[in-house]
Amino acid sequence: MACKITSLGASLTHLWVPDSRNLPRDVVLGFDDINAYRTQHDPYFGASVGRIANRIAQGQFSLPDEPAITYKLDRNNGPNSLHGGIDGLSFRNWDVDLTGETPGGAGVQEGTALQLSVVSNHMDQGFPGCVRVQCTYRLFNSTLEITYEAQLIDQGGDSGQQTTIVSLTNHAYFNLNGAPTPGSTDKPSTAPVTNHEVEMLNIEHYLETDSTSVPTGKVLPLDEVPAMDFRRLKKIGQDLAQTPGGGHGYDHFYPTRAAISTPDEYRLSNDICRVTPVTLVKVYSPESGIRMTMATTEPGFQLYTANFVQLDSDQIDTADKSSQNVGTQFSHVGKARWGYSPHTAFCLESSRFPDAINHPAWRDQVLLRQGDKYYSRTLFTFSTE
């Protein structure tokens, strides 16, 4: 098992895992050319997104300690702010600390780790307070672990800001059939994930959304909407056409059972004490024999089935380096050069509830105060059958 990461957006670009024949498959969508990332062709492939993952309604919010102040954000997704704005953390070049082999110990797994960090200044993209964010990728045994940490820091110019909001996630696009290999010459296409089998655990609800994909505040039981229910194993494609919002596919947040029954456990001030990830999803590809299990400390995750991903082969292609237009093309794009289409991947974006700051019952999940430490830990474990 191996992975490849770029400092641009602390992004996961490749993840090779063995299939049932013990042959390596790259199970995340993306590009072989770093220049293709964060362009108009890139729907956040593998990115670390923030300061706030997912959407904030109407691109604005107020803090409970300052109700008269409205913070205005980029509206880069219709009327809403998405993934931290047009120049969020996924567009930054993060600092890299190659920590190498980790010694293990209480609460720490042995393995190989890469640590990246970035500072987001006061009023960066409209968010108050100066925040230092750290991302750590760790490979051990057959698991990829991704952790995020964040703290308010005093860097001057923020007038002693004591509170801000944070919710981070990794936006990997998984396809357990594997992406085409760069050396392929027979124009292979990336197979849809509609044949992938999914089972959810410790999940009993999903968040209802409006026409702009922002939560309405209603938490709906899965029993009421069978298309959303994966508590029993079923294929992603089985009810895809019956999903709420027009049947385009899944783009919905699934809260954990505990986040609904005991929400105080997910107050951000409790983050450093919450160290035990909960298993929420198991996904299996009959074609490759690869099974992936996701466990996380987060109160839920967004299931997204790449509903609007459309990358034709003539959008991202191998450029002629002698071309006069080389500055507007890409020198080489391997695994994506034949393009991607809707439903060729799924995302499991573990995070705090979308638009949590605008819902009093949820906002304590994202409120980061001076002295608190934001912490999340998500593990993707692979096996074969």
Image (cartoon, rainbow, N blue to C red):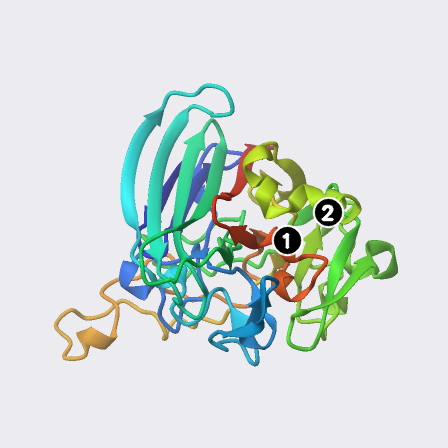
* Tag 1: amino acid: Asp
Q: What is the spatial separation of the Cα atoms under label 2 and label 1, in whole angstroms? A: 9 Å
- Quadrant position of residue 361: bottom right
Q: Position of residue 248 (x, y in %)?
A: 66, 71
* Above or below for 283 versus 113: below
**Residue at coordinates 64% horizontally, 61% vertically from top-left?**
356
- Quadrant position of residue 261: top right
Judge the density around disc 2: few (<14), some (14-19), many (≥20) Cα neighbours within 10 Å: some
Residue pointed to by mark 1: 364
Please name whichever residue, 168 or 22, is drawn nearer the observer in this view of the structure: 168
Residue 13 is tagged as none
Q: Where is residue 203 in the image (x, y as percent from the top left)?
A: 75, 46
Nearer the viewer's eye, disc 2 or disc 1? 1
* Above or below for 79 versus 185: below
Kindly tell me whether residue 184 is visible in this rendering.
no
Residue 263 is tagged as 2
**Residue at coordinates 28% horizontally, 36% vertically from top-left?**
98
Q: In this view, does 30 lie to the left or right of 309?
A: left
What kind of element bears circle 2?
helix
Does label 2 or label 1 sit earlier along the sequence? 2
Q: Position of residue 218 (x, y in %)?
A: 78, 64
Labels 2 & 1 near each other (Cβ < 8 A): yes
* Tag 2: amino acid: Pro
Kindly tell me whether residue 372 is visible in this rendering.
yes
Q: In this view, does 239 lie to the left or right of 295?
A: right
